[in-house]
Image: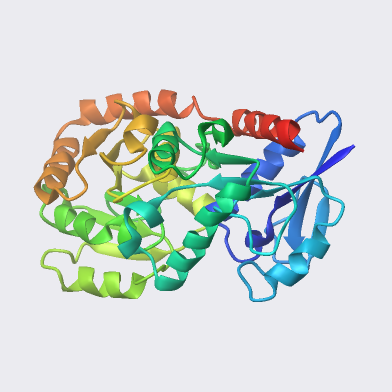
Amino acid sequence: MRTVALDGRMLRHDRAGIGRYIWQLQEALAALPQVGIDIELLVDRRGGLPSRPSLPVRTAFAPVRGRLERYLLPGALRGTDLVHYPDHGIPQGVRASAVVTVHDISFLTHPETHAEASRRHYEGAVRSWRRARAVIVLSEHVRAAILERGLVDAARLTVIPNAPGLSAADRAWDRRVWPGPFALMVGTIQPRKNVELAARAFGASKFAGPGTLLVAGSLGYRGAEIIRAVRTEPRTESVRFLGRVSDEMLVRLLTQAAFVLMPSLDEGFGLPAVEAMTCGTPVIAAKVGTVPEVVGEDALLIEPNDVEGWTAAIDQLADDEGLCASLGARGRARAAEFSWERTARDTLAVYEAHA
């Protein structure tokens, strides 16, 4: 019997982003029949999990990106045939056979949007790809970009799309989450998410009179600086920062929003757009990176630095209920093409090929 460890140590401090990917993947993997392979979830011994995992657990005291990780992690992995690292690269000092998931390559396309420590981490991650048995990416766009740079050979690159971790809820309209109409942005407050452009474009739109732009997400690199900059912009008094919200609240926000904005400078997949589509909410997204591949023709796509274009798109949705209804229905059908069952099956196939 071959043993695969899915590295879930990030769950201790990351419940969004990669943390959500790990949690949804382990749940979906546990629901699949596994012949000749055992999958375990490697977690931090100190706890911090959101709830009881679906996979069997293996514990370790080897903090993610910590100074002692290279010394402590190999012992925790003793007896495993393959390890799946979801944080872009293989930790230093680990020699076990490995699969890596690369969620986006903004550290290559927009390094200025990352802190210096983050850039150093990703530089090491890229070097580690040479040792990976397989590198999973979320889109054909990211696969092509990695191949173009000669960082991984084609035979080791596998495209496995992400999937929405939230679903439309019947009770999402039970109570209003905001007293008036609102648009929504979801994501960590950091330069790559282009929050300042969204605030300027929204402030110049006719929707900003009766409506509010709600931004749901925790502070990331330069997050406080971005919020201060938004608050000093003219006509941005209708922008409100909610911080991080629960999954239940996020479903309500996505369902009740008039539309969702995703003006990111780069995205490896664009999960907020897909989750908005799942809830039947229209999306305006940046025409960049993987986003056109993921949303197709079922969202409005605008260049990420075109403030006037974003304002015009917001006005267009504010004025056209028919277009909103059409985008909502088409988006829901588009989002249904992505599922965690499919993601788990394709990931299991990678495990079976390399364990």
Q: In which quarter of the image is the C terminus?
A: top right
Q: In this view, does 265 lie to the left or right of 337?
A: left
List x then y, in percent, for residue 62: 72, 69
Residue 186 seen from this side: no
Q: In the rendered image of this protein, does residue 131 appear above or below residue 10?
A: above
Look at 63% across and 29% down and name the residue there.
346
List x then y, in percent, for residue 2: 85, 39
**Total labels drawn:** 0
Residue 284 seen from this side: yes
The colour scheme applied to this rendered structure is: rainbow
List x then y, in percent, for residue 210: 18, 53
Q: In the rendered image of this protein, does residue 285 appear above or below residue 114?
A: above
Look at 32% across and 50% down and name the residue there.
184
In this orientation, which residue lies closer to the viewer: 77 or 25? 77
In this orientation, which residue lies closer to the viewer: 4 or 238? 4
In this orientation, which residue lies closer to the viewer: 63 or 82? 82
In the figure, residue 142 lies in which quadrant? Answer: top left
Q: Is residue 212 left or right of residue 313?
A: right
In this orientation, which residue lies closer to the viewer: 231 or 73? 73
Q: In which quarter of the image is the N terminus?
A: top right
Q: In the rendered image of this protein, does residue 143 appear above or below residue 245?
A: above
Look at 87% across and 52% down and name the residue there.
79
List x then y, in percent, for residue 127: 53, 55
